[in-house]
Amino acid sequence: MEKEISFEKVDYERDVERIHKWMNEPHVIPFWQLDYPIEKFSKHLQKALADAHQTLWLGSLEGVPMSYWESYWVNGDVVEKCYEADRSDRGIHLLIGDTAYLGKGYSLPMLESMVGFQFQVHETTKIIAEPDIRNEKMIHVFEQCGFERVKPIELPDKTGLLMFCHRDVFERRRKHDGKRRIQANT
């Protein structure tokens, strides 16, 4: 059965309480560390929304928001100092917030959809990720999507695993894998 995947830009008024709730879920807290009181989280989200080098998204299945995404330009981000970054490199952060969607195989098709969306920028030939080095489940999902492990990196809030996904590898994998289980609309 195919399910529709969609992404919509985060709207502060509509989404702050939902994202705050997700940041306080036990499976999210160790890796995002944003389990703040609502007042502090609200300021954090407003600052993130005002940051011109990133775009925040809600990911939905069949129109139901269930995930949070940050699509960012590496240029201007703290991670740009961790490798020889190209000006067109993009990065990605994500979480499945709604616990009803955990362990159901949705992370990979959602990630493939967002990475495909990021590669619509012609100049971008590499997407990076830097998941917490302890988050083996997400590292595995990134690898299934075509990301390769590069090296551990020290960031202000974590030790991350720098991972690269090159456009040619991603496109080759998508052709090889054939029809995906979940169809995406962005």
Image (cartoon, helix red, strand yellow):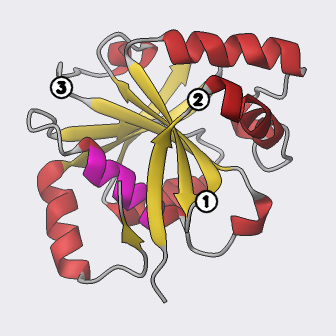
Q: Which secondary structure type mostly characterizes the magenta part of the structure?
A: helix
Quadrant in the rendering for residue 33: top right
> In this orientation, which residue lies closer to the viewer: 140 or 14?
14
Q: Is residue 176 left or right of residue 74?
A: left
State the residue at coordinates (22%, 59%). 170
Q: Nearer the viewer, mark 3 or mark 2?
A: 2
Location of residue 25 in the rendering, given as x and y in whole percent from the top left corner: 84, 45
For marks 2 and 1, the one nearer the N-term is 2
Q: Nearer the viewer, residue 42 or 102?
A: 42
Residue 31 image point, x, y percent: 70, 38
Q: Could you say whether the residue bearing mark 3 is in a helix, strand or loop?
A: loop
Give the amino acid at mark 1.
Lys
Residue 70's label in the rendered image is none
Q: Which residues are magenta?
A: 109-117
Quickly name the residue at label 1. 137
Question: How far, Cα to Cα, is label 2 from label 1?
Answer: 29 Å
> Which residue is drawn at the image coordinates 44% and 13% (left, top)?
78
Q: Position of residue 65 (x, y in %)?
A: 63, 53
Q: Which residue is mark 3?
A: 88
In this orientation, does residue 102 appear?
Answer: no
- Judge depth for marks 1 and 3 and give the one in front: 3
Identify which residue, 96 or 82, lies in the foreground: 96
Quick check: is 116 in the magenta stretch? yes
